[in-house]
Amino acid sequence: MTFNDSPVCEQKNTMTLLSGRLLLFFVLNGCVLLLVAIAVAGFYNRNLPFSGQWGEWYALLVSFLLLVTGVITGFVWIKRCYLSSQNLLATRLNGVLANIPVLVAIRNREGLIVACSNKFRNFFGLSGDDMMVSNSQLYPPDVAAVINTEIASVRKEGKDAQFEITFPDLTGRQRTFDLNVFPLNRGMDGVVEEVGSFAVELTELRATEAVMRKALEAAESANRAKSEFLSRMSHELRTPMNAIIGFTQLLEDDRNNPLSDDQQDSLHEISKAGNHLLKMINEVLDLARIESGRLLLSLENLEPRELCLECISLLRPMAAQYGVTVVLAPGATTHVKADRIRLRQVLTNLVSNGIKYNHDGGMVELGCELAPDNFLRIWVRDTGPGIEPGFLPSLFQPFERAAAFDGLIEGTGIGLVLAKQLTEAMGGTIGFETSLDSGSLFWVEVVQAEQMEEMEMSPEAPTVPLPVSSECERRVLYVEDNLANMRLVKKIISGLGGVKLLTAESAEAGLELVRTGRPHLILMDINLPGMDGFEALGLLRQNPETRDIPVIAVTASVMADQVHRLKEAGFDDYLTKPINLQRFVAAVDALLETYAPEENK
């Protein structure tokens, strides 16, 4: 079998063969017709030289010759048709093998290659005379052994085999192929006579996959590093804020040593600056969490008008300070699917902007209305001066503030950016309309909930510290390596009756105090030198004598995954730094009641 015939040569050979067949057909048929005419004339015309008995014998002879001629003609014709079809199949096979862009090979029962594609020849450097070669002559020994094993399996089972294999080309470069082996035909004994194979190159694909895999690993590593950085920054930034805000709260509530009016004013400024800085830290961390894909949302069915009332109640003191009235307009009462905390954060930001960027005696109005495509629009309209046209393109850019208000109105330039990204993370959209000297209208559209459910309002945080019962002395252990935080908790605990505070600067020292001092409640910092808070909790829960002591995690991290990990680890509650005085006292009181009274029965 040859592989070098071009399509033009094949076409010429086919036309020559066809002309020869037609000429042979006409000659044979002419001879047959002549003999038939002579036989008929001799049989029916007695006056001819062949009349009589000789004429009959002549007719029989002609008929016999006619029969033999027909048989020979039919045999020759059938043979010619068979050879023609074989040549046509060979021509087609040659054309396929010459042009197919994969490595194709056909092997006989002995494993020798009897036909192959031009791609196969070029890859292994074979010439037209290099047929009948074995796998061991083409491949390295280990690769040849694998291929021979697969071919033997195909011969035995008669089923296709597919596997990936790598071997070098003529230049020594490693190439990867997807090799498919399949049976072609069987002999009379049922054994597979020939086996075909084709190999599709995967070298570039595998190289691309390797590059993508490395890029993905690098991205995941960068994402983990970013998350660790965020967690670390959250801890490092919020820890000093815990001391600033915590001690400020203590000084403000210290009735035994009241401050002068000037001192109260100064303390108020410190508290205001501290809370502003804390808000900015939270917003920056929120933005970073969204960008890194680490923001976790808890979607639930919400009644937006109740959420609007919460925002109005929360911002009423701020509105009074600016001389602005905040009202809720009549509107739709349908439910929406959103994260309660995040949606309230968005609305609070929009309303606070409406209050700040307004005039004395102005108004901020909230409302809800149905929007197309099963959305609900919550809008906030103010009566302020509006937004300058030149500032509109950078309205949702971080740290951008209108020049007319920059430095005059408190703010970070992050709020609107965060509101936009939070809204989009919940599947909604945000937009606005503004007009100079007529105010602005901001709105968010969120998806309506499919089912209406009665929602319970979250209880408001107490405004004064909750009293702790002093019927018996109760011991609280605080494990903390930051001395400023430890002094803060000492001052808070000292103002509570019937509570004794034990302290330790490491988890190891804290576990020893648990064994000797038997506390009723443990406040456990998470980031400790040596053993961290998670490991210490695990040891406490393994000991039957300490497994029931309630443990509150105290952490500067507000990352959602960290909070989830705290709950999964088994902490009874958690407090975030900066510590909220009311929240701290309420948590301590609630958990002390679950353990100490039982010990004193």
Image (tube, rainbow, N blue to C red):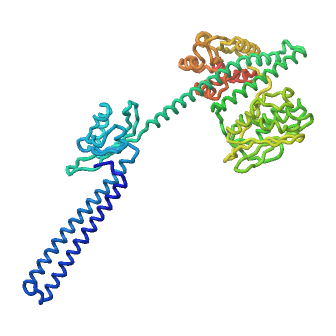
Q: Nearer the viewer, residue 209 or 318?
A: 209
Q: Quadrant of residue 233?
A: top right
| Direction from residue 601 to residue 16 in the image, left or right | left
Q: Position of residue 549 (x, y in %)?
A: 61, 19
Q: Residue furthest left?
A: 53
Q: Position of residue 303 (x, y in %)?
A: 74, 42
Residue 552 pos. (x, y %): 65, 21
Using the image, determine if residue 399 lies above or below residue 328.
above
Please say whether residue 431 is visible from this viewpoint.
Answer: yes
Q: Residue at x 29, y 56 (%)?
A: 87
Give the vertical position of 321 relative to 247 (above or below). Answer: below
Q: Which residue occupies the foreground of this view, 539 or 472?
A: 539
**Residue 461 as seen in the image, left or right of residue 407:** left
Q: Residue at x 10, y 84 (%)?
A: 55
Q: Residue 82: horizontal and vertical position, in percent?
A: 26, 60
User: What residue is shown at x 12% (from left), y 90% (from top)?
Assistant: 47
Is 173 displayed left or right of 43 in the figure?
Answer: right
Say if 536 sits above or below 346 in the image: above
Q: Which one is nearer the viewer's eye here, 46 or 356?
A: 46
Residue 477 in sight here: no
